[in-house]
Image: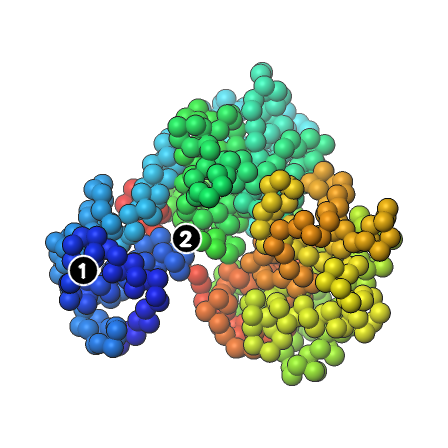
Amino acid sequence: MMLIYEERAPDAYFSRFILRLIGRETCDSLPLRLAVSMAARSAASGDVCFDLASIHETMVEYQGNRIAMPSMRDLRSLLYDSGAAVAPGATGPLVLDEKGRLYLYRYWKLEHDLAARLLKMAGHRAPETAASDALSSLRTMGELEAGGMQERAVIAALTGKLTIIAGGPGTGKTATVGRILSILRQQEGGRKKRIALCAPTGKAAARLQSSLKAMSGEAGAVSTIHRLLGTIQGSTRFRHNARNPLPLDILVVDEVSMIALPLMAALVSAMRPEASLILLGDQYQLASVESGAVLGDICSAAAREPDSPIGASVITLDKSYRFSGESALGRLSMAVNAGNAASALALLMDISVSGISLLPVTGEMAFREELKECIVEGYRPYLEAETPAGALRHFEGFRILAALREGPGVTGVMKLNRMVEEILLQAGLIDPVEDFYPGRPVMLSANDYSLNLFNGDTGIVVEDALHPGRMRVAFMTADGSLRTIAPERLPSHETAYAMTIHKSQGSEFDHVLMILPEAGSPLLTRELLYTGITRARALLEVRGEASVFEEAVKKTTIRLSGLCDILHGV
């Protein structure tokens, strides 16, 4: 079998740089150049490391040459003897471990340090009797089911320094952490405990704060991880780190599946040794855009050895309070998550099942006509709302989610947004004569800490009540209040009638219209479908070919790393 490696310019440059660094710039060993280039390519593709076993004793087409790659033993010798790679624990451009994982040194160091800190935190656990009084109180009030998974999560958080509460949407992760925080505040000296809550995006942070406030009337400040750590302009480092730790006793982090290895390592390294960390997330959702799948790796290590310190720290909530056992959305998400494409398709195509459907993408004009009613009725409530606050609330009722930003035909976000504008214009609901016209929804794609606006925040253009004819962009804050910003002050943004499934993470909508490309794509995976499906609270319409949906269900995202093995002690 021939492997064709199409080298990107950055990877070729990195390979030449490393060879120059080790004094081998005139080296004519194509296998060495190839291995270094592929390690760089893996890091850029979301993997933490590159698996050398994938190319040993393989024919590879590289730089116009056909290369017979040497055995694993010879590849090791080549990398070690050249100085391009070192063994774990040593310092060098690349690190090659005993399992054949080839890392850029930075990623090996981040993974190694994160694993060490997590294991140390997981090793601190008091007897369960320490939580008995608090549990009795919650059981008496009927807030906890004796022996249930939420009770186990509460016990883990009250007795340990590391707790991971995993589970799908609607399984009670936020409710459980709300109970944990309530107990901690009621304990002796609890009001003096320094507690912080954060999430990877401003949108997810605001949602966490509003959910906790709705449950108990008390949430405290919630921020993005970057803001909590303290960004330094022009640097990838943060003000808070191991030398200057966060002044906290307890840190709660939501939407952990979205957090890449570098950011998670930075966050955990900034924790005080005596502080406790509570992580929340759905391990089956899309992994982070950048390198790693930290939550998935932690949960996999726990599943391998449930009685280990890491195993005892991970609690998976499996009872859905959003979807009943008969819910079509619940059954569909479970079928997709299990990789059961036949069951998922049968549900979608069964006309007797309400709440979910699958229809093909037709030609552009027919597709537009078929979606017209859905789009007009989906967006009419917010466009006809009498107040900006009402418009923002109604806008969360319906959303178009696309698998790709730029897809074939009209299946990509950019073209879908233009199509929606044309449909709403024809319906007389908008008049887009200017860039910032009343009713235009905008999503931010960058943070602006001075304005307290964050990547993923969504606002709606409204007319200035004090200056008719002038436009403002209205945003809903985490505490439910309204704020408006002049359009010219907004950071980078785009129209948001349609958004990618990636961007929808951390959000929920009553009605979701999910658009799949006309043909398969490397980006179209089981995790992407699962994430899109679970954004819907009540109604899901999927537009795409059954064959494309089936192919995606069968394809999983694999992020190469060694974190699971390290946590498992392998």
In this picture, residue 541 sits left or right of residue 343: right
Front residue of 327/234: it is: 234
From the image, tell me which residue sits under label 1: 25
Mark 1: few, some, or many residues within 10 Å (few <14, many ≥20)?
few
From the image, tell me which residue sits under label 2: 291
Front residue of 110/444: it is: 444
The reply to whether residue 475 is in sight is: yes
Report x, y in % for residue 320.
62, 49
- Write the residue at 45% across / 69% down: 522
Image quarter (top left, top right, bottom left or bottom right) of the C terminus:
top left
Report x, y in % for residue 235.
44, 42
- Write the residue at 56% across / 66% down: 405
Q: Is residue 391 above or below residue 336?
A: above
Tell me how far mark 2 sits from mark 1, CA to CA.
Answer: 28 Å
Image quarter (top left, top right, bottom left or bottom right) of the N terminus:
bottom left
Residue type at numbered disc 1: Glu
Report x, y in % for residue 177.
59, 35
Disc 1 element: loop
Splitting the image into 4 quarters, where does residue 161 fall?
top left
Residue type at numbered disc 2: Ser
Q: Is residue 262 above or below residue 423?
A: above
- Write the residue at 63% across / 33% down: 221
- Write the residue at 66% across / 50% down: 490
Disc 2 element: loop
Mark 2: few, some, or many residues within 10 Å (few <14, many ≥20)?
many
Q: Is residue 312 above or below residue 13?
A: above
Report x, y in % for residue 362.
65, 82
Splitting the image into 4 quarters, where does residue 511 fall?
bottom right
